[in-house]
Amino acid sequence: MRFSVARLLATALIGTAGVQAVFPRPEASEISSAATPSSTASSASSSSSVCNNSPVLCDRHYNDITYMGAHDSAFLRDASTGNSVAGNQFKNATFALDAGLRFLQAQVHNENNTLRLCHTSCSLLDAGPLETWLAAINDWVVGHPSDVITLLLVNSDDADVSKFADAFEKSGIDKFGFTPTSKTAWPSLAQMIANDTRVVSFITNIDSSAASPHLLPEFNYIFETPFTVLELDGFNCTVDRPSNAGPASNAFSKGLMGLVNHFKDQVVTGSIIIPDTTNINLVNSAATNATGNLGLHIQQCNQEWSHRPSFVLVDFWDQGSTVKAADNSNGISDATGRTSVASNSSGSSSADGVSSTRELGTGALIAFFAATLLMI
């Protein structure tokens, strides 16, 4: 009865298209979250002297570069999901890569013995099989041979590493997998490109596997800052996870790389929080002069750690100046081969920015609440 009431409430308020955000049809979400890769490879692909869009980065070691990343990259707030308020991005993962992001994070659930990209619950927002998403990323990697990317998958249901290995193999992306031989002596991007080991994959809640050495337990290599921030002054550089990492200086001495979580949520009611779009341009700004700025947060961590962050995660990456913030951290101004957000906006998302998210209104919010009933 609870299921049917929730569904009827959602249907009555936002119609069939909107309900797909809460009770999605897999075929729609599978297409939207992965999308067709860009048909035009970046200009970096034709030159071995350009790595991740800049010649400056070629000789720099993998762990001495800041990679801007899309938090919950598979979960879209666009027409394909009925503008679901649970979505963290307006534009999909391959568009993010086209624009210059080189770090993609997603949440994975083991649903009916299949790994699927689901936000909190597959009944809330289902972006399709992990294998389908990885296949689209693989196609992008094939078309961009001078780029190194990083994946971070949250293993929400503690699935065995062998299930991830199967998805990676079937998608074809496993052939690009990089296996480190040391936590401190990472190769340069040029070396990784020359060896065609251009995909670094971290997964939570797995053990190292001799059968799949390229699938890396996240917290063996990475520490993170806090990820639930509700106020603009809540961003900091404290080591939040793993709990045994100690302060940042200790974590770096162990060879861990720093991940900065820079996305703000807002409380809707009670314990329900959703991604905040009201302050998104400020939060995603590369500037360093206002509380909550992305650039300021990166600068703060760089100063406190005496080391640039290796990874940064943001919501709605196409808002603000997220890629510029990474460029500033890396000290580069000569980037080439990127696709501007404006030029890829058609077809990638129905949302152009903050104003469109404000048009969702009460209907979409109540549909979101209705979906949460299914998890109570």
Image (cartoon, grey):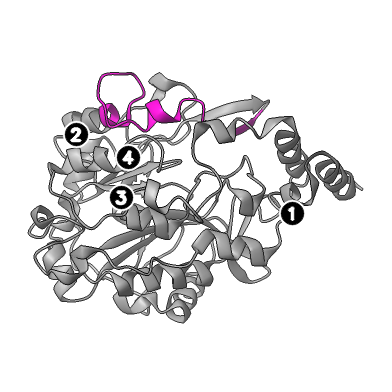
Viewer can see residue 120: no
Look at label 2 and name its amino acid: Asn
Q: Name the residue under label 2.
A: 302
Mark 1 to mark 3: distance in Å?
34 Å
Q: What is the crowding at mark 1: few (fewer than 14 residues within 10 Å), some, or many (at least 20)?
A: many
Q: Residue drawn 35% across and 36% down?
A: 225
- Asked whether, in this view, residue 200 is left or right of residue 31, the answer is left
Mark 4 to mark 2: distance in Å?
16 Å
| Quarter-of-image position of residue 42 | bottom left
Q: Residue drawn 49% across and 66% down?
A: 133
Marking on residue 222: 3
Q: Is 277 within the magenta? A: yes
Viewer can see residue 370: yes
Assess whether mark 4 and mark 1 are in contact (beta carbons under 8 angstroms): no
Q: Mark 4 points at which residue?
A: 322
Q: Nearer the viewer, mark 1 or mark 4?
A: 4
- Asked whether, in this view, residue 326 is left or right of residue 316, the answer is left
Look at label 1 and name its amino acid: Phe
Is 63 located above or below residue 270 in the figure? Answer: below
| Quarter-of-image position of residue 122 | bottom right
Q: Is 104 within the magenta? A: no
Mark 4 to mark 3: distance in Å?
21 Å
Mark 3 to mark 2: distance in Å?
16 Å
Assess whether mark 2 and mark 3 are in contact (beta carbons under 8 angstroms): no
Q: What is the crowding at mark 2: few (fewer than 14 residues within 10 Å), some, or many (at least 20)?
A: some
Q: Mark 1 points at which residue?
A: 23
Q: Position of residue 32 (x, y in %)?
A: 56, 60
